[in-house]
Amino acid sequence: MLIIRSVPTGVFLAGLTMGTAAMAQQAPVCPEVDAAAQWAGGSEATSDIIAAGSPFDTMTLVPIDGKAASVFRLSQQAEIRVEARAQGDGDPLLQLTDVTGRVLVEDDDGGGDRAARAELTLEPGQYCLSAGSFDGALMMVQMRVGLQAHEPLTTGNIVEDGGTCRPTTQAVDLADGPVDADLEDGVERTAAIGETGFYRFSLDRPRTMTITATNEEADPVLRLYSYEGDLLEENDDDSVSLNSRIDVSQPLEPGSYCLGLEALSDASAPVTVALSAYDPVAAERIRYDAAEAAPRLDGDHPMTSLGLVTGRQRIDARVGDTAVWYSMQVDAPGLVVIEAVGADEVDPVVSVFDDLGRIVAKNDDGAPGRFDSFAAVRVLPGTYTFAIHQPSGAESQGPVRVVIERYALVE
């Protein structure tokens, strides 16, 4: 996915950068980006991509629910390309900002094969390229920044005109008039993305809504545009599948809007686009099912209490389309290790949250070439929750054996 905000005209592709061993004595700063940054090219003096004979590459580790960042300079206006590609199983999100922290471009899958990439024209100045993980997991990533004349890191996944829906773009009307009165029952249309890539709808009054694009065979990317063609929201995968979902929780103002679709797989597969009234409870439940947030301890979401964790405890779970939740009590500082081993090619993921709902550990594959997961958490007295789930789009279902081990702190 690609988002551009207030930048000169440019084209969108994919890429990233590899850092040299030599680092500047003083680390650069990326405003509004919560990440440790390093100079592309090794130091401030050598970070000008105009003077470089080749792209800047930075290989770095993206922490859980964090970002990695690289700073570069331009001594003159240039057409540049920024890219990010995971090493192994990962899905990087790319973001480029200026010295004020203003977001210039964001991308998810523009590089092809889950890599991120964007091409655009930039004025002289200093810029920050950052990469995070789509699912917040630990990830090794290669970032590249270079001129468009340089060799790209990724293959690219280009949509003509950036897939933008402008006032002159041919689009199918989702309804004969404003959709306000139809949202409770829902409005939908089905067609292949290769035949119908854009839909329009209008509102008479401010409304919240949920927009979906459904057919995993197509792996649709869904984008919401204003009438003028400004990208407002986009989504590739809805956390539990390859379908797309946008929850518009802040009311859209009255006016005309456009939906743009892109197929990452089969553009001839029929995709159903639907608008419905936004349900905050249902939206939160979806986040619980994807282990993106922890359910309330006093809520009604299904959760098994394991009581006080002591020594070694083993439980069996069956993981399907939604996360299986557990809570556990800790009465003293120490360490808790949670290991999940799947059968029949089940790929379990472990996500651990504290009593405030903050994620404190997450792991997908604990060792190279294996699907088993391993999470170690330093704990204090209190209640912790953890979920056993699968990566977005995973098709296998089956049994998972979970082992919880408690280690006490020795004075």
Image: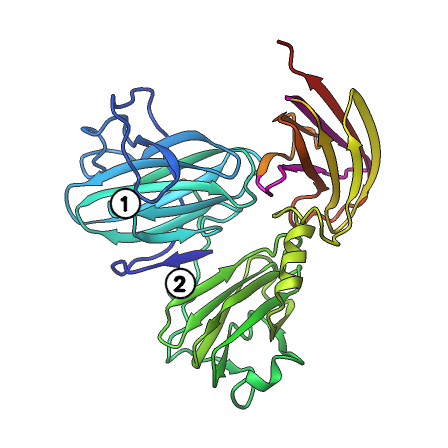
In the image, 262: left or right of 24? Answer: right
Residue 223, horizontal then vertical, whole percent: 49, 65
Residue 368 appearing in the image: no
- The residues colored magenta run 333-358
Amino acid of disc 2: Gly
Label 2, secondary structure: give it.
helix
Whether residue 310 appears in magenta in the rendering, the answer is: no
Residue sitting at the far top: 411
**Sequence-first disc among 2 and 1:** 1
Amino acid of disc 1: Ala
Which residue is labeled 1 in the image? 149
Give neighbour class at mark 2: few <14, some 14-19, many 20+ (Cα, 10 Å): some
Residue 117 appearing in the image: yes
Is 405 drawn above or below residue 268 in the view shown? above
Which residue is labeled 2 in the image? 162
Q: Nearer the viewer, residue 149 or 404?
A: 404
Label 1, secondary structure: give it.
loop
Whether residue 336 appears in magenta in the rendering, the answer is: yes
